[in-house]
Amino acid sequence: MPIQRRANAKSTDNNGIEKKIKRGNAHRQASFWKGPRSFLLVLIAFVACGGAGWLYFSFDSDITETLVRQGEVVQQPRVFKVQCSEDYDSYKRYPGCTPQTCGRAVTDNVVTREEAGGLRRLADRGMALAGSDGGASILDLHSGALSMGKQFVNIYRYFGEQIKEVFSEEDFQLYRAVRARIQGVIAETFGLDPARMYLTKPTFFSRINSTEAKTTHDEYWHPHIDKVTYGSFDYTSLLYLSDYGSDFGGGRFIFMDTDGNRTVEPRAGRVSFFSSGSENLHRVEKVRWGTRFAITVSFTCDPAHAITDPALP
């Protein structure tokens, strides 16, 4: 029986899978999204412990430098070094992985625009099953978490074998290949041993539009530091699946430095990556129009926090 998309959810011929979601969505959530350190931090991610200096917002007029524009094509990683924060002195160090030099970098030569299009179609199919009532939805192929209304469900638990009608093995092969390439370019750029880097959670697709936030789950725009928010993060990367200026407006990634705000304009296939400490405080502008798609791929130096690549059930 085909799995119907959310656009048909109100029709009289809803299939049993959709009915099962409606009956169970109040209490059958993806377990990783529960609790105070749950995956909802992906979208709230608000760090209030650093003093009032962090509690400000960047508007278009406040951007002092555009590091890379959408129309540029960056073949070799464009690296912007920043001084590592003192926070690393309090973290356990892992030789071959813990940042010795810190910074941020951008490349358009790791993932093709065709591959980005394939991953966007994967995200479209998955999120068409549900989606947030507000403007920010996530899909996590690792845990199965998917935004639904004002909460989350586990697509693998609900659909079982029928999820193969939505995703194919080729989808997952592409996802794994892209993840490996991103890991490789981060290791090469920062001088790391890729075998000592581990994929960690949360790693997820995001879809953001201009719909008004309905809950704090939809408030993706707050400033935060990944290492503080998630703990396990040592390196963060974003793979953009849509184009700034044509697919959406707003939605730029902003590094909030002490001497100004610096932005990277999204481009489909562009990979932006950075060390996850407080040297890279950041936020995302509110999306004004259109839809912004991206994948956050995160890495840790601590093998205890490693996760494996996703696979079809």
Image: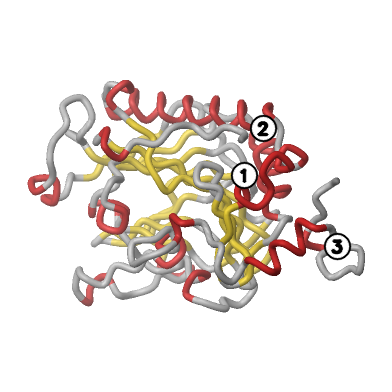
In which quadrant will I find the C terminus?
top right
Left or right relative to 40: residue 89: left
Crowding at label 2, few (<14), some or many (≥20) Cα neighbours within 10 Å? Answer: some
Question: Tag 3: residue type?
Answer: Asn
> Is residue 94 placed above or below 159 in the rendered structure?
above
Q: Check whether the beta carbons of the residues at disc 2 and disc 1 lie within 8 A of each other.
A: no
Question: Tag 2: residue type?
Answer: Asp
Residue 192, image x, y percentages: 27, 25
Residue at image mark 3: 14
Question: Tag 1: residue type?
Answer: Leu
Crowding at label 1, few (<14), some or many (≥20) Cα neighbours within 10 Å? Answer: many
Question: Which residue in the rendered view is the most extreme toward the left?
Answer: 89
> Separation of disc 3 and disc 1 at Cα?
31 Å
- The numbered dot on residue 171 is 2
- The numbered dot on residue 241 is 1
Q: Nearer the viewer, mark 2 or mark 1?
A: 2
- Of pointers 3 and 2, the one earlier in the residue sequence: 3
Which residue shows up at 73% across the image and 55% down it?
128
- The numbered dot on residue 216 is none
